[in-house]
Image: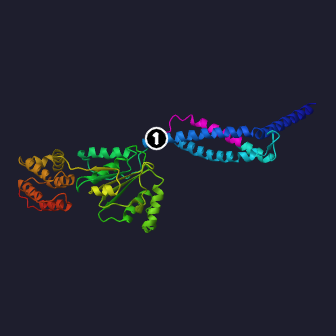
Amino acid sequence: MGNCVSVQFSFENILIRCWDSTVGQSNYVSNLKETLSALSTALDKLRAQRSDLQDEVLAAERRGLKPLERVQLWLSTAQTMITEAENLTAQGPQETDSLCLGGCASKTCLSTYKFGKQVAEMLQDINNHMREAEAFNMVAGTQPPASVVIRPEERPIVALQSTIDKVWSCIVDSDVGIIGNYGIGGVGKTTLLTQINNKFSTTQNGFDDVIWATVSKDYSVGKIQDEIGRKIGFSDESWRSKSVDLKAVDIYGVLLNKRFVVLLDDLWNSVELKDVGIPKPSQENGSKLIFTTRSFDVCGEMEARKKIEVECLTPEEAWNLFRDKVGDETLNSHPDIPKLAQQVAKECDGLPLALITIGRTMASKTTLEVWKFAIKKLEQSEFPKMQEIVVCILKITIFPERS
């Protein structure tokens, strides 16, 4: 008797499951039009939700924040779903045309069943995915500092800080892609760019890479490419032996997918970015090109959106810098030296390079004759020529000091 009950119970379960399966399969067919309509509505909502979330991410990136990985994954998955759902809705008319018996059956039953199941599952997946987005309290977090090679620098020149602040405000401004810094030789342009470079290592900024290249007067495109290549992973001998055109293609391919900063120091003439392989910075890609030059005209030729003059130091700033380099011990070694030192500082015309270099040279000079000799030679010099600074230093150094 027990066995009969067990067999009967199993048989009933099989019937129930078969019935459920048959009803479920028929629902995929009979509800196809309604499910397609619901999928179309859900697809519109998903597109709008993804667009809104993408706008939030872009706004966060402009503030220097890094999009959360789970948000990026959600956006990627949403795009895949949108593509798949669009394909299904495009096939919809063909499948609904095969329906018969008031929509309860299909002329191509198996095909319509499979299609109806895909539509129903996609609708469920989209609804679940949209619910996931509702749980996002934030779309981005703090951005780690950009990958940057810290360059050696001396103690920062306080007088340059206001110029550094101007440049940094342009870096933060999404409308400014190319920033030109111009000024006479020795005014501190390389020092400025070095401090900007190093600031990226400690400041959250949203950039992937910060790349430095020194250009100089007799530059070559290949030399600039080699400096950039070392920073982005092209450092082997076989790559360096490639042609300039092939190197440009490689560099462009890497930088195109990054939010980068390229720092070009000491431009004497304009550089064609496309020849090097540097994508032109713009508001759309969020990248930056920052360069230094002696020529205001070069700023225009490089299409700098912002041109910032690096100015000479004021008399007070110049004296403070020079006094710091000479040192109190030397300045106090004779009552007349401070006055002579102020004359020397004045002859340096507010150029940090001259003030620092000559200040160091005079740091060991404790006789009035040498200080007077230095003033005489500086009065004969034609700053801001670097060679004049060197000549002055040599003449001061070889002066036969008497103690």
The residue nearer to you, when weighing 401 against 219, is: 219
- Residue 132 lies, in percent from the top left, at 59, 36
- Determine which residue is flagged by label 1: 59
Residue at x 10%, y 50% (from the top left corner): 343
Q: Amino acid at mark 1?
A: Ala
Tell me if residue 109 can be seen: yes
Spot the residue most to the right: 1
Would residue 166 appear left or right of 83 to someone viewing this image? Answer: left
- Residue 317 lies, in percent from the top left, at 18, 45
Would residue 156 appear left or right of 224 to someone viewing this image? Answer: left
Corner quadrant of residue 300:
bottom left
Quadrant of the rendering where the C terminus is positioned = bottom left
Q: Label the magenta part by its dominant secondary structure.
A: helix
Quadrant of the rendering where the N terminus is positioned = top right
Q: Which residues are magenta?
A: 119-139
The residue nearer to you, when weighing 368 against 188, is: 188
Count neighbours of disc 1 (C-alpha within 10 A) and say few if under 14, some if 14 to 19, many if 20 or more.
few
Secondary structure type for disc 1 = helix
